[in-house]
Image: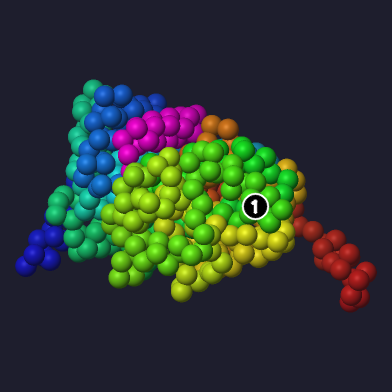
Amino acid sequence: MSEQNDTQIVDQIVANARKAQAKFENGACQNRYDQAALAVGWAIMQPDRNREMAELAVQTTGLGNVPDKITKNHRKTLGLLRDVLKAKTFGIISDDPATGITEIARPIGVIGAVVPSTNPIATPANNIINAIKCGNAIVLSPSPKGIAGCKRLIGYIHAEFDKIGVDHDLVQMIPAPGTKDKTQRMLEITDLVVVTGSQNNVRRAYTSGTPAIGVGAGNVTVIIDETADLAAAAAKIAASKTFDNATSCSSENSLIVVDSVYDAFVAELAKIGGTTVGTDLEPHIVGRLWQKGHLAKNAIAQDADVLIQTLALEDKVPTSTKFICVETKGIGPDYPLSGEKLSRVAALYRASDFAEATKIAANMLNHYGAGHSVGIHTGLPARAVEMGHTLPTCRVIVNQAHCFATGGSFNNGLPFSLSMGCGSWGGNSIDENLHWKHFLNITKVVREIPTNEPSVDEVFSDYWKVAGK
């Protein structure tokens, strides 16, 4: 009976969303969509509410820290609004006389979004803005720990909607208690599902029968070569690795350092709180960072002092330690440090040269996190291009703090997002950052144009010169 009730609850929520979406689309205009998107943006960016929701997120999930969540909520939303506000998402968006094709933007309908506990405010807000900007309704399924934050966010969004006459039912969430049955039903009856977080949820989305966008697992590996600005690289890695206590899938998990600068780079890390420990401590750390095959809950996304206590390193690292680099060599299932750690812990590998560093990076990605992203700190731009040609990755981040760059930044050209598609390497349907274009259908009006039919000779002439007829 409970399963039937869960189904009925979700059915009603989605039915209400469909009515609200039809009303939103009927008689709409670009300004209407833009104003609603701005309402969502201000709901999270208003400073007092931002702080309140950041505090609630840390309190209820036990992950990350308040100052960084405030920064993330603000900058990710501001950057997304920069990206979407000038975008055409209503009516005719392209009219090309040369091709005879007119493109018309159309909403998808009701979006279903599964969002993680690591970013319980910023990720839902990102998805809502994209959905609303394109004329859709959206229903959220937060993780159990993220329910309180998601509910608070939606309450503030509805308050902003009241100011401009927008229906509350455009933005809803699956009510507590969260269950797999509720989420599954949402996956089955919405028009598009977007899933960030659990790879189990991603797989369920792809098999739900509904068009789905899922994102892959992160396991960021960064190369530091012999031409890198070591001080700058260390500072950027430290800022990225410690931000929000490494909750981001784009936080550095492994560092591969070319031998000729290894000691100098380790020294630079030490200056800014990156403590390196030797391979002799690897079993000690692994035994405490993982419990029964899973990351220890009291180590994930914790402040440095809590992490050090959890790993029983109080007498083994300086009190100034902000994050820990563990020297290691192994890669694969028998070497947990080569996977994602969601903590202020990074694996540290030594490579004889850049060629070996790329081989290590390839092995790392093939083990875990293929498709997501890699980074390099270098003075030779061609090396990043070489990595793009050879590694199974959708992004090569060059001389940047990885977790700030991968999801879009004010000083790079990637769209702002908290969800990174990993392409076929990561088992995903997209290979780019999730953004507003993924929330649209586009209708093409196709007219006749002058015939453009080549002759057989025009097509095959160059080939025949090589292979003959």
In the picture, residue 388 is in which quadrant?
A: bottom right
The residue positioned 31% from the left and 24% from the top of the image is 47
The C terminus lies in which quarter of the figure?
bottom right
- The region drawn magenta spans 64-87
- Establish if 148 lies above or below 253: above
- Give the x, y percent position of residue 387: 67, 56
Residue occupied by mark 1: 262
- Give the x, y percent position of residue 216: 45, 59
By what rule are the colours in the image chosen? Answer: rainbow
Does residue 215 show up magenta in the picture?
Answer: no
Q: Is residue 225 visible?
A: no
The residue positioned 39% from the left and 26% from the top of the image is 31
The residue positioned 16% from the left and 61% from the top of the image is 7
The residue positioned 38% from the left and 51% from the top of the image is 315
The three-letter code of the residue at mark 1 reads Tyr
Local SS, label 1: helix
Depth check, front residue: 393 or 399: 399
Q: In the picture provided, is 161 more to the left or to the right than 258?
A: left
Depth check, front residue: 286 or 254: 286
Main SS type for the magenta part? Answer: helix
- Give the x, y percent position of residue 115: 32, 50
Q: Is residue 318 visible?
A: yes
- Give the x, y percent position of residue 355: 72, 61
What is the crowding at mark 1: few (fewer than 14 residues within 10 Å), some, or many (at least 20)? many
